[in-house]
Structures are given as structure tokens and as C-alpha cells.
Amino acid sequence: MAKLLAPFNSKAALWVKGRKGLMPCIKTAMQLNDQPIIWMHAASLGEFEQGLPVIESIKKQYPQHRLLVTFFSPSGYEVRKNHPLADWVFYLPMDSPINAVEFINAVKPSIALFIKYEFWYFYLSELKKHQIPTLLVSGIFRREQLFFKWYGGFYRKMLLKFTHFFVQDKGSADLIKDLVQPNSITISGDTRFDRVLTIATARKQFPIIEQFCANHPIIIAGSTWSEDDKVLQHFTKVHRNAKFIIAPHQISRERLAECMQRYPSPILLSEFESLSSNQLNNFQTLIIDNVGMLSSLYYYATIAFIGGGFTNEGIHNTLEAAVFGKPVVFGPVYDKYLEAVEMVEIGAAFSAETALEMEVLLDELLNNSDAITKAGQAGAFYVSTNAGASNKILDYIQANLLLIN
């Protein structure tokens, strides 16, 4: 399918290009290695960020081990292919009996970490065959998944390949407890809490952003899709006292052009940075045209709008904003994200069904500083009290001697 789409879709083209000559490249890289390897597989960028605090903890404790990271999606590989913590970053070769055998024989990992949703039958089977410890990190299970259908026997077999499951919540543990080995489940929570706390502690500062914000109310819309733009468009045009920072989920030329068309007095960040000081106040909307700033940008927000909630995909990372004590708003598609559900329940986040409801919600918050403060404090407390999943995973690895110093 990806090959058919490649001529018409840049992401599919990257997916195909990245797998050309992939296995020989992996084998060549591994031939030069004489140290034990930790293998982490993540579907995409979000899952990589989810696994990163675990890897950071493991590498501190086992510095002689080298790190191999694999991705399924270009959105992870293209952004993190040069990450300083990783010794190698590759796409994962397609899941097949031959590829799995060749990959595991070449890499010979000491441990394998699969992040959140990743289930590949032949790779898991080969890891099991070689008795390589295989952990699911920040796993989350829902009743509608194929594991729990009457016809889901093939998928249930994959669960038996894992050594241990670190799941986000009790509901997930309850769903799989009768399908896996006894004592192979730990309710660890979500490692993203650890990740956003680390980011907040070492957040990047952007003087140019401070100049743009000045003393205006700031709404930062992060990881937005076209559907989110349509919801926000009218609100931005009738609230001239506020300023808006828009960070689209994709920064293709087409998406950036769409954002420039929809929002009032817009400018791309790359162009804004080259302006003289007396020109900086001429713009109401700043469009972020790079990757990597958003998690630190939320610090400057009065309110954070999290994109994806008006699409079928669902919302993106709410914790990146909550860690800075910012109230969070998003569309109606968030039920698959435990942290979003819980943040709504404690008053740290708010959801709107329609563009009109979103306008009313944003107005109410902007006109009530106490409500903004209360929601922000609830979110920051929620993040801080849910940290610690990475340490639980490291403790398990050490207690069971899965890696040797």
C-alpha cells in the first residue's frame, strides 16, 4: 500500500525510501559492534518520547550498553534519526519470518522494549525463541481492541511472547490478566509524566517568542490539524487583543500555507526571527514552521489548545502543557487518552463539541483569571503526582537481573 501511495504522499514516500536496502545496512552496522545492545521500538515520535525517560534511566545504570532505536513511521524516524542518546536509529524492517530471524540474529539485543501499542508477531516470536527479555512500556488496552474479540486468537498469541507488561492503569491490567503469564503485569503508570517533567525542568527559552507575546493573552494551539484550524479561525479573528501561536501537526508546505490563510495577521517563525524590533508588533499569529519547540513553547501560553480533538485521530499530548500549569482545551475526540479523561474530571482540562462551544469556553477562561489559575494548578499537580513509571521499570530490570553491568 505504501508503495502505491508513495508518488502522491510524501510520508508514504519516506516510508518506502527508508526501507530500501535496510536489512543489509543494519547487518553492516551490527558487525562493527562488540557491546551489549538495548533495543527500543517505537511506532512514531510520540511513542519515542514516551520511551525516552526509560532509556535515559537504563543508560545511566548500564552505560556500557549501546542503544538501537527503530521506528515504524517517518514522523518518528525523520525527527529523531540523529538523537544523541541512540547509537543507531533505523526503520523497522517489515514484520516477516525472514526479516525477524535476520534482524534478531544481527542485533542480538540483551533486552527489547516495545512502546505502548507495538505488536509485531514474528519479531516477538523470535525474541521469545531466543529468550530475550521483552517488555511492553506504558501499555494501554481497551475492550474494543482485537485481543479481546472472539476472533482475536492470533493477537492474543502475541501477548504470550512478552516477558512483562508495564501498563498505564488498572483497567488495562484487568483486561489482559487472564491472557498472559501470572505475575507478568505491573501497573506502572505512563512514562510521559516523567518525560514532560524533565522537559519542563530544562525548558528552552525563546526571547523572540517573548517579544511576540509582550503582555497579550496567549493561546498556543499545538499539533493542530485542518479541522482544528476551522474551529479556531473565527475566534482568532474577533479577539484582536489576544495573540496566537499555531504549531501544526505537520509542517508541510501545504499545511503552513493553509495556516497562513486561515489566521489573522500571520507570519512564519522563520520569517519573524529576521524582522527588526519595530516590526514585531505587526503580527497577531505566529506559525511555528519547525519541529522540536512545542513542548517548551507551552510555557508562554495563557491557554493551551491541544490539536487532534476535532479529527478521528484524537488529541495529542496534553501533559506537555499541563506540566507548566496551563489550562488545556481540546475537541470531543479524547476518550482513548486516559490522562485527558482524568484531567477533565479534575478540572484541569476542558472539552468542547463544536466551534461555537469552543469559542464560549475560551471566552469564559480568558475573562476569569481565577479559573485559569485553578485549572493550571490542578494540571501541574496531576502531572507531578503521576510521575515515577520509569523508575518502576528500571527497578524491575535490576531486580530480575535482565541486564548485567
Image (cartoon, rainbow, N blue to C red):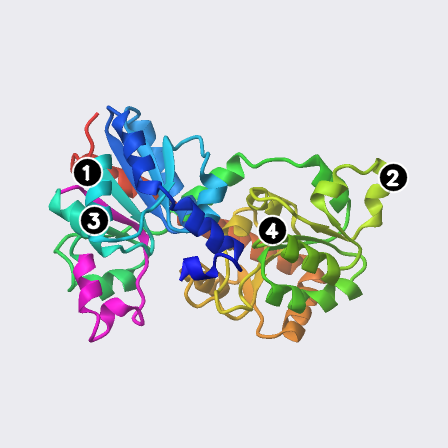
- Residue type at mark 3 is Ile
* Segment colored magenta: 131-159
Residue under pointer 3: 98
Closer mark to the observer between disc 1 and disc 3 = 3
Neighbor class of circle 1 (other Cα within 10 Å; few <14, some 14-19, many 20+) is: some
Mark 3 or 4 closer to N-term? Answer: 3
How many marks the image carries: the answer is 4
Q: Where in the figure is residue 254, as x and y percent of width and height?
A: 65, 57
- Residue type at mark 1 is Asn
Closer mark to the observer between disc 1 and disc 4 = 1
**Residue 251: mark:** 4
Q: Secondary structure at mark 3?
A: helix
Q: CA distance from mark 3 to mark 2?
A: 62 Å
Q: Is residue 45 visible?
A: no
Mark 1 or 3 closer to N-term? Answer: 3
Q: Residue furthest right?
A: 278
Neighbor class of circle 4 (other Cα within 10 Å; few <14, some 14-19, many 20+) is: some
Mark 1 or 4 closer to N-term? Answer: 1
Residue under pointer 1: 105
Closer mark to the observer between disc 2 and disc 4 = 4
Q: CA distance from mark 1 to mark 4?
A: 38 Å
- Residue type at mark 2 is Asn
Q: CA distance from mark 2 to mark 4?
A: 28 Å
Residue under pointer 2: 278
- Residue type at mark 4 is Ile
Mark 2 or 4 closer to N-term? Answer: 4
Residue occupying the point 21% across, 70% down = 152
Residue occupying the point 77% across, 36% down = 274
